[in-house]
Image (cartoon, coloured by chain):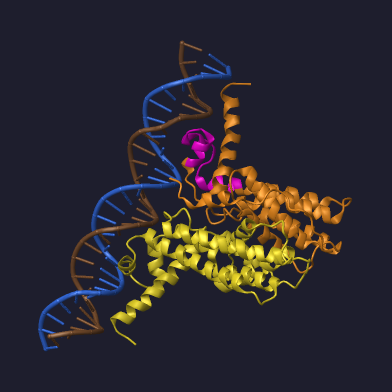
Chain colours: A orange, B yellow, C blue, D brown
Amino acid sequence: MSGRKAQAARNDELILAAARAVFTADPNAPIAAVAERAGVGISALYRRYPSKEALLQKLCGDGLKRYIEVAQRAVDDDEGDPWEVFAAYLRGIVDADSSSLTIRLAGTFQPTEELFADSARASRLAVEAHRRAVEAGVLRPDVTPADIALLFEQLASVKLGDERRTAELRHRYLALVIDSLRLPPARRALPGPAPDDEELGRRWIPEP
Amino acid sequence: MSGRKAQAARNDELILAAARAVFTADPNAPIAAVAERAGVGISALYRRYPSKEALLQKLCGDGLKRYIEVAQRAVDDDEGDPWEVFAAYLRGIVDADSSSLTIRLAGTFQPTEELFADSARASRLAVEAHRRAVEAGVLRPDVTPADIALLFEQLASVKLGDERRTAELRHRYLALVIDSLRLPPARRALPGPAPDDEELGRRWIPEP
DNA sequence: AGCTTATCGGAACGAAGAATTCCGTTCTAG
DNA sequence: CTAGAACGGAATTCTTCGTTCCGATAAGCT
């Protein structure tokens, strides 16, 4: 499995993964940072995407697709325990890091028609997943789908250490909020260790 | 109360307020944006602060002082209901927007010795306020002071509409988390209306 | 009234950064 | 053996931003 074409196909993924990592870390990162992270030259990028904006649109579109997939799963599930279905939906969106790929990137590119359409679709699914949870009597009715959207964004703002640690902490705070969203009130142990002082303090020094 | 000196004193405040607004909205904002927002020329800025970095250090220092003041109040209060004291501390920090002025600005300037000292002092007070709440049996013992710090940061990431609306929403989500932090579990109505779709959707279009 | 000087507005300057283009090189497929 | 796809990265061009500089203004003092 070698050859020029295989290498190119591998670069496709490499570049997308690098772009995700770089732009979720900093929506205004230069495009050269993506190339460097992917371990390719700049021209490898421009061969695939006509501009930075096109790349960002692609990332955002992928983020919406992830969202739609996870939400669709929650809406389609008629068997599982309603609360568990809803909680799995929340965890799934947090893991997909959809907020970082969509609304967080907004402002750095001009949204296309397709993006608007997918965004509307995602929104409808979110409302439906929400409605099911409320009607099943497992979700606090005074929180709205828009509240949930903002909660996702808040969780996406958590960034500490590497990717794994960040995901762990997001789940920790999601668990805190899940406890409070749940009806009737329940309380479980928080997952993942709390941050320690060294972990928090490291962030004060400018990098370069 | 006019005169050159009064005007200058008024500008002192104007500039600081503008800098707070501009840099909490965007930690990498150009210094010209501060001058414009304050309605003064650039030289009015450079007369007061030798560099952009010095201004940022001042803002961060002020943020820490606000934090210390609020936390000190919580630590000193021996009379009030322990939970109410702790909840007021949380609300106070959110209102002071300390996170946006401190850790959020970190990386845009070199921290001074004094900042480190104040930061340590703030941290000690936070731990003490936390300890009191846990020992009074009103705060979930599996959340640590570091958890609380990250919660503040998450709340500070909420930004929607004008300053008033943003503060309202932060309190809404603080209430959600407060419900879950509290021991024994309690549940109150959420303050402030949830965001509506138009409010959320407006953020997709790039500004200029 | 006239002079001094603190204060200010904003243009000018220079450095840095970033998106995109361009060119020479490599290596595969046919 | 060669045409050309794919690539690395320097060169180009444009923008942005921090800082400096200069002329204008008017308060306060003599």
Left or right: A56 as drawn, with respect to A130: left
Image quarter in which the C terminus of chain A is found: top left
Left or right: C4 as drawn, with respect to A60: left
Q: Quadrant of residue B148?
A: bottom right
In the image, residue B76 sits, relative to residue A35, either above or below, namely below
Image quarter in which the N terminus of chain A is found: top right
Left or right: C29 as drawn, with respect to A178: left
Is any part of residue B124 visible from this angle?
A: yes
Q: Nearer the viewer, residue B202 or B106?
A: B106
Residue shown at 58% from the left, 21% from the top: A3
* Range covered by the magenta-colored residues: A33-59
Point out residue B114 in the picture as x, y percentages from the top left corner: 43, 60
Residue A15 among those drawn in magenta: no
Is any part of residue A65 visible from this angle?
A: no
Residue shown at 52% from the left, 62% from the top: B121
In the image, residue A103 sits, relative to residue A165, either above or below, namely below
In the image, residue B71 sits, relative to residue A97, either above or below, namely below
Residue shown at 29% from the left, 84% from the top: B3
Point out residue A65 in the picture as x, y percentages from the top left corner: 69, 47
Point out residue A84 in the picture as x, y percentages from the top left corner: 83, 53
Point out residue A69 in the picture as x, y percentages from the top left corner: 74, 47
Q: Which secondary structure type mostly characterizes the magenta part of the structure?
A: helix
Residue shown at 36% from the left, 75% from the top: B11
Q: Nearer the viewer, residue A3 or B35?
A: B35
Residue A34 among those drawn in magenta: yes
